[in-house]
Amino acid sequence: MDPVTREIFRNFPTWMQIVFYVVGLATVGFFIFGFWKKYKKYSRGSDNGRFNNFAGRFFKALALMATNKTVYKRDTYAGTAHWLIFWGFVVLFIGTVIVALDHDFIELVFGRENRLLDGTFYVVFSIFMDVSGVLFIIGLLMMMFRRAKKPPQLDYSRPDLKPEEYDRSGYKKDDKAFVWLLLIIAITGFMIEGLRISTDRALMDIAFEQTASPVGWLFANMLDGIGLVGDTAHQFTWWFHGIIVLIFIAYIPYSKAMHILVDYANLMFKDDMAAKRLPRVTEEKMTEGMGYLKLEDFTWKELMDFDSCTKCGRCHVACPANASGAPLSPRDLILDMRTYADAGGSTSEWFQQSYAEGVKGNGKKTMVAGGIIKKKTLWSCTTCMACVEACPVGIEHLTTIVQLRRTLVEEGDMEDSLQDALANIGDYGNSFGQSERMRAKWTKGLDFKLKDARKEEVEYLWFVGDFGSYDAGVQNMTRKVANLFNKIGLDFGILYEGEKNSGNDVRRIGEEGLFEMLAEDNIATFEDAQFKEIVTTDPHSFNTIKNEYPDFGGNYTIHHYTGLLCKLIDEGELKLNKKLSHYKVTYHDPCYLGRYNDETAAPRKLLELLGVQFTEMRRNKGNSFCCGAGGGRIWMDDSKLEKRPSEMRIEEALEIDGVNLFIVACPKDYTMYSDAVKISGNEDKIAVKDIIELVEEAI
């Protein structure tokens, strides 16, 4: 036998090997049964057409997993630790498969002389395994150290229940079991190697192991030093290691470790337009009930979402509702849905959360919207999409929230103020409850006549939106935009009373029927108008016209006004004649512009061209913090919040030394932050301005 190798079952009698294989096969059977139960649960969900471009999805998810890109995002430490664990685990798993293939197939079928683990291949293989094992352990220790520091995202306290109403100690046990099982497996693996080397080098020349297994050699020296040597110690450690491995395999489908299997699939089947473009309600659901009432109403992807959650808490700390003291944590909502789905799908975790008697009820019988997930939790969401953007495993929280809101809307279970806003939109086409004929009243302050795009051809149709048209505090800003467009000779017009609320927030409230009516009415008006492209000052309208109207036959080129201004500057049609270097500003990315549509460059380019002293807030671009107005929250009572998101954002801006202007590019933002400055008593420290005011001053 070539001495440059190692024995798999060193000095193991045949009966002991048979016992291992029998127990191993039983464990694999237990694993397959648990995974099959999960699959059966997912198969109860409805279809949602995620198998298009299968190859593209597969390789995209593979790239995300290989690079750990989603885990690295805004947390380099966690990303590095996870990368070490992931690749250490992958290499060790592949190595184990090679060992099994070599011993249980190649050696048996082709003879011992043809085995893989001999000579140079064995040396290279063993080096890879040793290095990967060390990196694996380092990653695990980094994660344990991080958890010991108790960062806020790993705090399992719930914002919606009192401490005595729930018990999440099971989650903490699951976290510890997961990392400790892996750590014990890794360390005992090196101990087995060390004991084998220690025993073998006393009997033969295995100097090659000092190169092939440097860590094992080091362990051998350490074990020699404490007198732990011999075949008995090796066999005992081998069996201990093997049993822990088998326990881990059995544990996977019933624990946090399930994410090892489902997270890849969840990233693969993630919809990149999730939240940006909400799913339509089928005709069948329109008659049966638009919301979710039972487990079968959820899509299989949503059911997989619930199992994919690793409880990392990134959505929890990113959520503006949670930060403001509202009873919503996206993480808790997903975990509650997991508990509900497990009960309905006859699956369970070994370490579960539990509730005091009567708090949540029976998952099979209690209503989901308003029962499993409290209505005040659902109505707290600002639909800012921060949870979806922050999630490293592709969970689409917002879609689930809106589907559950649809149930509440259908039952009329909402605040009176929200009901009134929806009624106004249904009756008048705007949330202010004013006549359609008043929509263009703001134009009376102009010294020129605005074109009616329904009657004469224009290059740009300006979709003004409700707040720009009706809100007295925003109308002056709207006039400044009109004056600027006119001054630079832009060929534009508006729809006058033909424009209606775009429906973006209506849809995210859960009023799908009203949204579809608004979308169809606006599209019909667009079809009667004469224009080439659309421009809007409202990011909410920008999102739904760009991303959701195409589902209803409305395909248009649309610009947010900051993007259009940059385009006009590039084309030489707009010239900035004055540098505003005396302003020290920061800029707030509107959720529906930055996070939803990745339009973060144009506003910053304008600020650069304006010559202001610009400093970013610590949360910016895709990580921007919500003003709190989205998803219908602007029409709801926020007096019970500990602190409004808009006030927290102003405080964040004031962290910047010397900042005197808070720049916005959204009518709702202008309203929310102007109020926040007044309420927080910071009027003498910072002023809120729309970016159009700076552009106007510069020309």
Image (cartoon, rainbow, N blue to C red):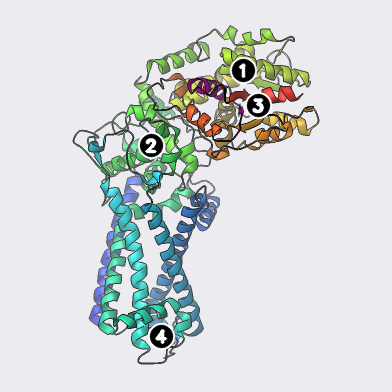
**Vertical placement of residue 541 versus 386, above or below:** above
* Picture disc at residue 691: 3
* Three-letter amino acid code at the position of disc 2: Ser
Mark 3 closeness class: few <14, some 14–19, many ≥20 residues within 10 Å: many
Element under label 1? helix
- Magenta part of the protein: which range? 656-680
Image quarter for residue 258?
A: bottom left
* Mark 4 and mark 3 residues within 8 Å of each other at the beta carbon: no
- Which residue is the site of mark 1? 525
Select label 4 or label 2 by which is in front.
2
Residue 588 inside the magenta-drawn segment:
no
Task: Pick whichever of labels 2 and 3 is earlier in the sequence.
Answer: 2
Task: Pick whichever of labels 4 and 3 is earlier in the sequence.
Answer: 4
- Which residue is the site of mark 4? 111
* Three-letter amino acid code at the position of disc 4: Gly
**Vertical placement of residue 455 versus 91, above or below:** above
**Vertical placement of residue 147 versus 476, above or below:** below
Task: Inspect this view and state whether residue 35 appears.
Answer: no
Element under label 4? loop
* Three-letter amino acid code at the position of disc 1: Thr
Task: Kindly identify the residue that appears in the image at 28 percent across and 53 percent down.
Answer: 173
* Three-letter amino acid code at the position of disc 3: Ile
Task: Pick whichever of labels 4 and 2 is earlier in the sequence.
Answer: 4
Task: Pick whichever of labels 4 and 1 is earlier in the sequence.
Answer: 4
